[in-house]
Image (cartoon, coloured by chain):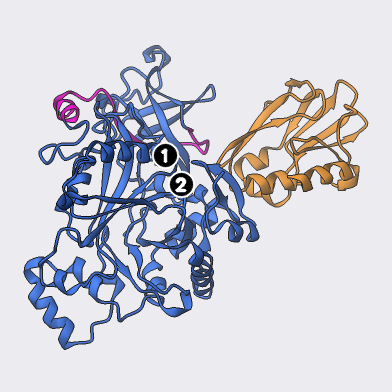
Chain colours: A blue, B orange
């Protein structure tokens, strides 16, 4: 089993360690609920080093990624991050990923500010699920090998940097304040890039020269990122990747640092956040799961797998059907025109008992949102009929009630639809509600 | 309850026996290991249990665990207070957080652990 560079810290701080995607990871330090609340009200630190971090450079990198991912990667401007799928020929989901395009660290940012972005001056970073990393690597290498006879201007440089780096999620309403105090102000170059519309580049440029603009992290938009410099107290010399992304439904960042610096970075951020009130907590994968569930975010292996139709999973926004070709695009075009057999919904339960993955979702005939048998007359009832299945379910610490995601036929997917869930032989009542369950203000 | 007078199961239940009356609960170790309790399912009074039979389940945010009876007996009382207020179980698992009371229908199994043996098992986890 693999261990992240923060393994020792987790164990020393009483984390309960479990296997996750081939890695030994902290599921909780003290309490899932407390850790969950820290992210909703303050800030939490989560070790997400198990996620795969694959980098692509070279003049052919954008076109190569275009040919594999469901989004048009070469259309990304430096600084942008997008959610995307990696699909097989049938349109089945191999993995769901984040793809980011960044000014290559060390590269002169002047050329980019001037709007003359040269092909090859950017680095693409693909973040993949831990459990799928091996499969994704095989998929990528297969396609790279197919195009081995690339011309020099189509060269693709590829590396899996997962084990030589660590990735830390800093999530919560206080994440900006925490990170702001640890980011070097001088490093404005890359920060400007993602804010600057190319056409505004001249204006931005002038502002940079006139005023000693500080790198204001708050100006880094959601799903943007850059290579930045951390203050010396974090002990990292070179530029590191900071993106305003996360998997919690809360504001925050994900920070990638060299493996050797990870423990010091984590420890320093932890100490710094602990001194503020309400306080930072280290957050395990248990709370990460309840956070993403409340945020209505799908998880690979639960809301999707290789047999899932992305449209049923509600991922049509990640499928570009009219751009460059990629494996599965034609299949997705065909699927996009077909009627959905089932759709992903959110369900809130009435009682305290959580529904779990695999529980059946049932409908009582005649019971939908608009004509429910409120009187409960026995003769009017029929035996509940299974129509779907729960894909993720837990207790929502924010709502104080169990919530679940699952798949049901479209005719039962309207908010307000009454459902029953078979929890180990006993029926629990609930209803379909809009996703997400929780949305930050 | 005095922890020294209790007997324990490897699955973290405790039982206190006084004549043919038994009181069953789960240990502080179990409560701590589960954390974030959200739901408990307890049986009806009158049901007869065999030793090691599941009589309910306790559920945390993360997972569900079966509750196993350390002894054989007929359920004579169920702690109705904790179903509505799991904090009682979390705060006081050896007293107010008891789960069921039974009238023994068979001798207490000799395989149950005493405090020393149970604490040794705890340390190993």
* Residue stretch in magenta: A330-356
In which quadrant will I find the C terminus of chain A? bottom left
Q: Nearer the viewer, residue A356 or B85?
A: A356
Residue at the far right in the pictured view: B19
Give x and y (percent) for residue A23.
53, 45
In which quadrant will I find the N terminus of chain A? top right
Q: Please tell me how crowded label 1 is: few (under 14), some (14-19), or many (20+) other residues with Cα within 10 Å.
A: few
Verify whether residue A13 appears in magenta: no
Give x and y (percent) for residue A341.
25, 22
Occupied quadrant, residue A420:
top left
Residue A290, label in figure: 2
**On what subunit does the disc labeled 1 rest?**
A
Q: Secondary structure at mark 2?
A: helix
Q: Nearer the viewer, residue A184 or B108?
A: A184
Occupied quadrant, residue A14:
bottom right
C-alpha separation, residue under disc 1 versus residue under disc 2: 26 Å
Residue at the far left in the pictured view: A199
**On what subunit does the disc labeled 2 rest?**
A
Give x and y (percent) for residue A215.
28, 77
Left or right side of A428 for B116: right
Q: Secondary structure at mark 1?
A: helix
Q: Nearer the viewer, residue A351 or A207?
A: A207
Which residue is tagged 1? Answer: A134
Left or right side of A225 for A353: right
Give x and y (percent) for residue A143.
26, 37
Marked residue nearer the N-terminal end (1 or 2):
1
Q: Please tell me how crowded label 2 is: few (under 14), some (14-19), or many (20+) other residues with Cα within 10 Å.
A: many
Q: Is the same chain shared between marks 1 and 2?
A: yes
Left or right side of A167 for A243: left
């Amino acid at each position: 089993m693999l261990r992240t560079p923060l393994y020792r810290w987790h164990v020393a701080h009483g984390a309960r360690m479990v296997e996750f995607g081939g890695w030994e990871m902290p599921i909780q330090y003290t309490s899932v609920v407390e850790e969950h609340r820290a992210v909703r009200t303050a800030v939490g630190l989560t070790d997400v080093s198990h996620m795969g971090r694959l980098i692509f450079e070279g003049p052919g990198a954008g076109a190569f990624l275009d040919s594999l991912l469901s989004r048009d990667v070469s259309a990304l401007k430096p600084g942008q991050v997008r959610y995307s799928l990696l699909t097989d020929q049938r349109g089945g989901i191999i993995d769901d990923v984040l793809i980011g395009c960044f000014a290559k660290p060390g590269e002169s940012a002047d050329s980019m500010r001037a709007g003359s972005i040269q092909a090859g001056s950017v680095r693409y970073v693909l973040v993949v699920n831990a459990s799928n990393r091996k499969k994704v690597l095989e998929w990528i290498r297969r396609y790279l090998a197919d195009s081995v006879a690339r011309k020099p201007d189509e060269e693709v440089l590829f590396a899996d940097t997962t084990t030589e780096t660590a990735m830390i999620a800093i999530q919560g309403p206080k994440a900006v304040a925490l990170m702001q105090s640890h980011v070097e102000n001088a490093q404005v170059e890359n920060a400007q890039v993602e804010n600057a519309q190319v056409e505004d580049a001249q204006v931005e440029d002038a502002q940079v020269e006139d005023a000693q603009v500080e790198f204001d992290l708050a100006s880094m938009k959601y799903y943007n990122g850059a290579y930045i410099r951390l203050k010396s107290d974090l002990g990292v010399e070179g530029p590191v990747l900071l993106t305003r992304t996360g998997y919690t439904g809360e504001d925050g960042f994900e920070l990638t640092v060299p493996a050797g610096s990870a423990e010091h970075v984590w420890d320093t951020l932890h100490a710094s956040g602990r001194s503020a009130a309400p306080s930072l907590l280290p957050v395990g994968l248990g709370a990460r799961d309840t956070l993403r569930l409340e945020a209505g975010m799908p998880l690979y292996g639960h809301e999707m797998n290789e047999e899932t139709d992305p449209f049923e999973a509600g991922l049509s926004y990640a499928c570009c059907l009219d751009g460059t070709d990629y494996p599965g695009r034609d299949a997705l075009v065909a699927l996009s025109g077909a009627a959905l057999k089932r759709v992903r919904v959110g369900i809130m339960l009435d009682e305290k008992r959580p529904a779990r993955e695999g529980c059946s979702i049932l409908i009582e005939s005649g019971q939908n949102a608009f004509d429910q048998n409120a009187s409960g007359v026995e003769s009017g009832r029929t035996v509940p009929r299974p129509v779907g299945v729960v894909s993720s379910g837990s207790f929502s610490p924010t709502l104080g009630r169990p919530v679940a995601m699952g798949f049901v036929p479209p005719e039962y997917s309207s908010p307000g639809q009454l459902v029953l869930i078979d929890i180990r032989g006993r029926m629990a009542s609930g209803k379909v509600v809009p996703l997400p369950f929780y949305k930050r203000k | 309850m005095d922890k020294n007078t209790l007997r324990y199961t490897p699955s973290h239940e405790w039982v206190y026996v006084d004549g043919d009356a038994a009181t069953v609960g789960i240990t502080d170790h179990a409560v701590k290991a589960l954390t974030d309790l959200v739901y408990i399912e307890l049986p009806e009074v009158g049901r007869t249990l065999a030793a090691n039979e599941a009589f309910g389940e306790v559920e945390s945010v993360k997972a569900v665990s079966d509750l196993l009876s350390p002894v054989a007996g007929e359920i004579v009382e169920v702690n109705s207070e904790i179903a509505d207020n799991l904090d009682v179980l979390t705060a006081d698992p050896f007293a107010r957080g008891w789960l069921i009371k039974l009238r023994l229908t068979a001798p207490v199994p000799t395989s149950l652990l005493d405090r020393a043996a149970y604490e040794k098992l705890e340390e190993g986890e």
